[in-house]
Amino acid sequence: MNTFQELGLNQDLLQAITDMGFETPSDVQAQAIPILLDQDTDLVALAQTGTGKTAAFGFPMLQKIQIDSRTTQGLILSPTRELCLQITNELKQYGKYCKGLNVVAIYGGASITEQARDVKKGAQIIVATPGRMKDMISRRLVDISKIEYAVLDEADEMLNMGFYEDITDILSHTPEEKNTWLFSATMPKEVATIAKKFMSNPVEITVGHKNVGSDQVSHEYYLVNARDRYSALKRLADANPDIFSVIFCRTKRDTQKVAEKLIEDGYSAGALHGDLSQNQRDLVMKSFRNKQIQMLVATDVAARGIDVDDITHVINYQLPDEIETYTHRSGRTGRAGKTGVSMVIVSKSEVRKIKSIERIIKKNFEKKDIPDGMEICEVQLMSLANKIHNTEINHEIDKYLDSINQLFEDTSKDELIKKFFSVEFTRFFNYYQKSQNLNISGDVSGDRPGDSGDNTRYFINVGRKDGYDWMKLKDFLKDVLELGRDDVFKVDVKESFSFFTTESKLQEKVLAFFTDFKHDGRFVNVEVSEDKGRGTSRGKRRRDGGSKRRRDDKPRGERRSGSRSGDSGDRRSRRSSEGAPKPRRSENRTSTSSSRPRRSRR
């Protein structure tokens, strides 16, 4: 179908579509809308982010509900506040000619009393996040016992965020005789499970292939040492002067840290993560949509509500823990028919993940080099030249021309041009003229950590019962040792002890740091291990007079023998087994280096 008129929509909706400038339906809209209008059926729709899924379920729901009734007839669940508000605003735009329509957003971070008041006025459609919706149901502030249509939007992400029980509880308050429409970008087994549990013989539609990335997005990866990750990010930004991007980090802490460093270095950047208040998030998103922020650094969860069509680049500063999440990230660009680029900055320890992503998205990555300093200087110079060439003249400057001409009367045209452009060029040239090559060798076949043999395996006397999983322990080690995230790998957590690996060149630093290291009143012991990555053997000391660990798996008070310069005799300390060591927060450090590249705010 080539037009919205052919889909069977009524005149009120077609008028709104015309006002919004939509001309032809997207693939998911063309497939889903006729089915949902003509049939009372459950539906599973798989389509990438940015393909118009909101309209695919929004138009049919608006046409099928009774506008003159104050009963809640439609419920839409979405994973985040931003996406909840986005869907609500879009439905209001679609239904602006539907007199009496009331669409209410229910989400955390806003007054629950005001939201309950809006619902009580008669909300035909409620758009909600699972947590707040469950809360309102328990307080009996909403009634969804008569809904006819339930939508699970971004179902895969809701399940990734741990909302399975909330969704189950919410749907238990809805009637069995309803239509459930599930929309998702990917189809992991958890989504298939929820479809089987809550749906009856659903119609399935797939736009493209399951989990496949958009054809509008090209994929690139850049291989650097972990310590050069931030420098690589800055070069990629400088090499793309008109960049308008989302930069993804794995944790809230890294997101805030990267954003602060970019701002400190003169970039127009901002952070978006779960520790921000709703007001802070709204301000950041407003600045980003208005392009006052050029580089938005975000976590995966916080970015779910970003609906900006002209994002030029997605930069994966760190790859996600779940490879499938990459599909959602790259879907932030290449929207609404535009092209985009998804860049990945990887170290050798994670380059193998590129092959895994390629299998999932069914797209190939192109390995590219981080540009060198002189390339960036040239790009910045020509970008400035083009901006000046295309700038409209402001004739208010005419009254100052005599003074300006007098100042430059002895300056030739070539000399004047050189002086003018040197203002910007010199800034980049001074910084980049002695810059190093950040690229390292390797490809997507990649060396797995430990393959080189130049690594050291360690035993540490903390484990699962101390509250650690592999991710928390890795973050702890990275923070206390002040290492890059990829400097610690092959983390294997057992019940009361664990193993981890670093390059052998870091062995002295690791062992020296954990000599008599005490945290919250407890010694944390690290020793070189005989374990080769299988997590099965105990550790041994590789120091003078190296002593072997007793064959038990309990953190214990043991005597540490050894000497330091100036020590006399043995040092004996009782190690308490009470209390888990917690990752300590590293202090925020503000660099005062004058050589830091400063980027002009655009």
Image (cartoon, helix red, strand yellow):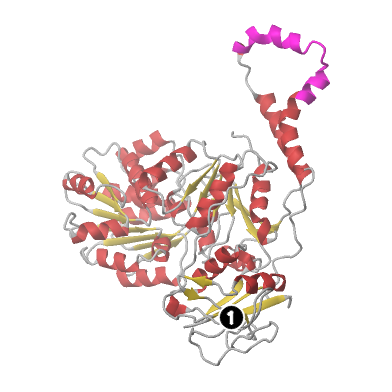
Task: Point out residue 352 in the picture as x, y percentages from the top left corner.
Answer: 65, 69
Residue at coordinates 68% horizontally, 56% vertically from top-left? 228
Q: Which residue is mark 1?
A: 571
Q: Residue 147 in magenta?
A: no
**As displayed, is residue 353 above or below residue 109?**
below
Q: Secondary structure at mark 1?
A: loop
Task: Point out residue 358 in the picture as x, y percentages from the top left corner.
Answer: 61, 64
Magenta residue span: 396-419
Visible residue check, residue 147: no
Question: In this orientation, which residue lies closer to the viewer: 142 or 560?
Answer: 560
Task: Point out residue 452 in the picture as x, y percentages from the top left corner.
Answer: 74, 75
Question: In this orientation, which residue lies closer to the viewer: 378 or 62?
Answer: 378
Visible residue check, residue 439: yes
Describe residue 567's horizontal placement relative to residue 64 as left or right: right
Task: Point out residue 581 in the picture as x, y percentages from the top left corner.
Answer: 47, 72
Tell me the amino acid under the disc marked 1: Arg
Question: In this orientation, which residue lies closer to the viewer: 291 or 259?
Answer: 259
| Crowding near the residue tagged with mark 1, few <14, some 14–19, many ≥20 C-alpha atoms within 10 Å | few
Quarter of the image with the C terminus in it: top right
